[in-house]
Amino acid sequence: MDAAAPLAAEIRAYLAHLAAARRHAPATLRAYAADLNLWQRHMAGLGVGEAGAVLPSHLRHFVGAQHRNGAAPSAIRRRLAAVRSFYRFLLREGRAASNPALDIPAPKGDRPLPKALSVDQSATLMGVDGDGFLDRRDRAMLEVFYGSGLRLAELVGLDLNDLDLAEGLVRVTGKGSKTRVVPLGSQAIAAVRAYLPLRAQRAPAAEPALFVSGRGRRLGSRAVELRVGRRAREQGLGVPVHPHMLRHSAASHLLESASDLRAVQDFLGHANIGTTQIYTHLDFQHLAKVYDQAHPRARRRKSEPEG
């Protein structure tokens, strides 16, 4: 592909690179594609059809149009970041001479913190009652989701062989196909054990997924989103609940109780906790100790009475 290739074709090549070389998750790829295709259509409206013909003035026009159309500052920042990343790829490949988005100022705006449930609200959400398949599956799903601080994609990607219930561990495949091992609390273990016999009645032997639909197939992300929202309404939480809120709640509650941020970093699978701080990897025994001492859904410590 030469330097005069159409902009749309260059974007397709970049997305293919993200999928093959960077191994981004499908949701991340869709977000990049949406932002870059939106930008490409705007460039086409300006009569710009090639990557090498894009000027900083074209990017400023794009940002201004986004403002006028009511785009949030965070969305504009994300789209500019996508364009900058796209041009870094073109520069490495020798398909562009410069990065026109490099010095384009991004709109400022406070980044709202994700909302978190209180510990009491989290406990209420976990209290799904009933012995039917959906009740037991949803209880197990919520306990694992919150108890292990998983991302949505990580939860739906769990397989049966990722679990070690005897040791209270779960192996998670996160962003960039990186794996980590995190603890399962005692209540998550109990909920999964109660769910597995009913799962075995629904899923064929060849189905590896931990969480399956009523037809025995791997549960998808959208189905999980709907179930989490529905259970929150049924449990009377009075606030809209989405999957990432459970992950953020787990992080918030653990951070409130733990004094070791690096252990929480490993728990969540973050490359870094702050924007500039990078922490070293901790061994699992230390992570498990912090988890047991701090997480609201962790296993009961031996020093506590059983009553």
Image (cartoon, rainbow, N blue to C red):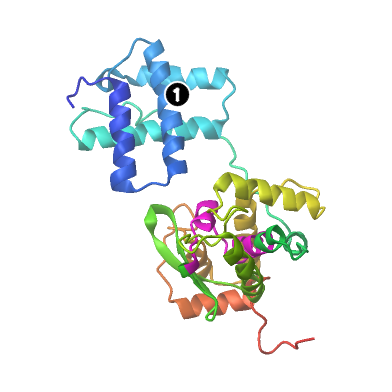
Residue 101 in view here = yes
User: In the rendered structure, which amino acid carries the disc numbered 1?
Assistant: Leu
Report whether 68 appears left or right of 256: left
Q: In which quarter of the image is residue 147?
A: bottom right
Q: Position of residue 66 (x, y in %)?
A: 52, 21
* The stretch drawn in magenta includes residue 116: no
* The stretch drawn in magenta includes residue 139: yes
Q: Quadrant of residue 189?
A: bottom right
Q: Position of residue 220 (x, y in %)?
A: 55, 48
Give the residues drawn in magenta, as a range.
138-160
**Where 172 sits versus 220, above or below?**
below
Q: Which of 45 and 105 is in front in this view?
A: 45
Report whether 49 appears left or right of 132: left
**Where 136 sits versus 83, above or below?**
below
**Where 99 sits versus 285, above or below?**
above
Q: In which quarter of the image is residue 28?
A: top left
Residue drawn at (30%, 22%), measured in percent from left and top? Answer: 7
Q: Position of residue 26 (x, y in %)?
A: 43, 43
Residue drawn at (32%, 29%), measured in percent from left and top? Answer: 11
Report whether 93 appears left or right of 107: left
The N terminus - image quarter: top left
- Asked which secondary structure carries label 1, the reply is helix
The residue tagged 1 is: 38
Q: Give the prevailing secondary structure in the magenta stretch.
A: helix
Residue drawn at (70%, 48%), measured in percent from left and top? Answer: 229
Q: Which of 128 and 97 is in front in this view?
A: 128
Residue 241 in view here = no
Q: Nearer the viewer, residue 128 or 248?
A: 128
